[in-house]
Image (spheres, rainbow, N blue to C red):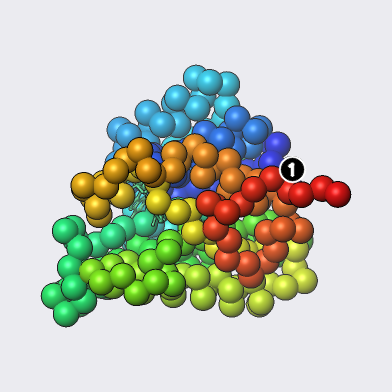
Amino acid sequence: MNIRNKNVLVTGASRGLGRALAEHLAAAGARVVGVARGEVELVAAMSAIRAAGGEAHAVVADVAAKDAVARIAGQAAALVGPIDILIHNASTLGPTPLRLLLDTECEDLGAVLETNLVGPFRLTKLIAGPMALRGDGVIVFISSDAATSAYPRWGAYGAAKAAQDHLARILAAELEGTGVRVFAVDPGEMDTAMHAAAIPDADRAALARPADTARAIAAMIGDPARAGSGARLEAATWGPAVTS
Ligand SMILES: NC(=O)c1ccc[n+]([C@@H]2O[C@H](COP(=O)([O-])OP(=O)(O)OC[C@H]3O[C@@H](n4cnc5c(N)ncnc54)[C@H](OP(=O)(O)O)[C@@H]3O)[C@@H](O)[C@H]2O)c1
């Protein structure tokens, strides 16, 4: 898939990986709609993309809010047209410092699931159908190694990411033959606000830069042969295609 002139919706686009994805895809010629709750940070991020010559629009909304999801899809379509590429990147850890599961309130687990699983599901329901009718589209779920490794204190987040991975796999199976490709990506450890909140004493020099991770994910979007529907990929091991 050529990213130029594609309409892209990125959740969590005001900072970290989402902002880097918005910047990279807009620089590649996509029309980007970015979503986040914090208006000031989101508008600044989208304005910076426009100042650099790209097209980017801000939709201030909470992906976990049931009533906001139809507005996100509607505003995005009104701003750029039908969405070709949907990237579920917005995510929450739940309360930090991270807690053992038995110390986690049920309400906190529920809130993490609303942001990391149910909200993306609601948005997918609105956007994947039109993609299937057009016979073209890509849906990317940003995952985590916490989806596959049982890290103590990462229970709510890890369970939500594991469920999101499986949701992506089942969507991919159900959408087979429609032209809609669905895959999940573990971005690896990146130097972002979320990482700092989870592991404040991490060696930041050892963490990936979101811009490098965004470049790898954009390459996956453009490469259906290597990033097929139903795949779960790792940005850290995604290298250039090997040609013989
Ligand atoms: N950083 C890492 O090392 C790492 C490792 C593995 C996986 N990941 C995954 O990579 C993705 C990006 O993480 P990151 O580190 O870049 O996070 P980040 O720096 O904390 O940025 C999160 C973004 O999501 C937005 N957001 C959060 N909750 C939202 C909600 N309910 N509705 C709308 N927007 C929301 C935030 O803006 P507002 O707060 O203003 O809404 C912000 O734009 C996430 O899916 C994360 O789970 C990260």
Q: Can you say whether 177 is above or below 6 in the image?
A: below
Determine the residue positioned at 48% across, 53% down. Answer: 187
User: In this image, 46 relative to 61: left or right?
Assistant: right
Question: Residue furthest toward the left?
Answer: 103
Which residue is disc 1 drawn over? 2
User: In this image, 88 relative to 15: left or right?
Assistant: right
Question: Residue furthest toward the bottom?
Answer: 102
Determine the residue positioned at 61% across, 52% down. Answer: 238
Number of numbered tags placed on the structure image: 1
- Please name whichever residue, 114 or 198, is drawn nearer the observer in this view of the structure: 198
Q: Is mark 1 within 8 Å of ligand 1?
A: no
Decide if residue 55 is in sight here: yes
Decide if residue 31 is in sight here: no
Q: Amino acid at mark 1?
A: Asn
Q: Residue 234, located in which quarter of the rendered image?
A: bottom right
Q: Position of residue 176 (x, y in %)?
A: 72, 73
- Please name whichever residue, 164 or 242, is drawn nearer the observer in this view of the structure: 242
Secondary element type, mark 1: loop
Q: Residue 144, located in which quarter of the rendered image?
A: bottom left
Q: Position of residue 79 (x, y in %)?
A: 55, 39
Determine the residue positioned at 18% across, 73% down. Answer: 100
Q: Position of residue 54 (x, y in %)?
A: 57, 27
- Please name whichever residue, 176 or 24, is drawn nearer the observer in this view of the structure: 24
Determine the residue positioned at 77% across, 71% down. Answer: 177
Question: Residue furthest toward the right?
Answer: 244
Q: Position of residue 201 (x, y in %)?
A: 21, 47
> For the residue carrying disc 1, how many other residues have a C-alpha within 10 Å: few (<14), some (14-19), or many (20+)?
few
Q: Can you say whether 140 is above or below 147 in the image?
A: above
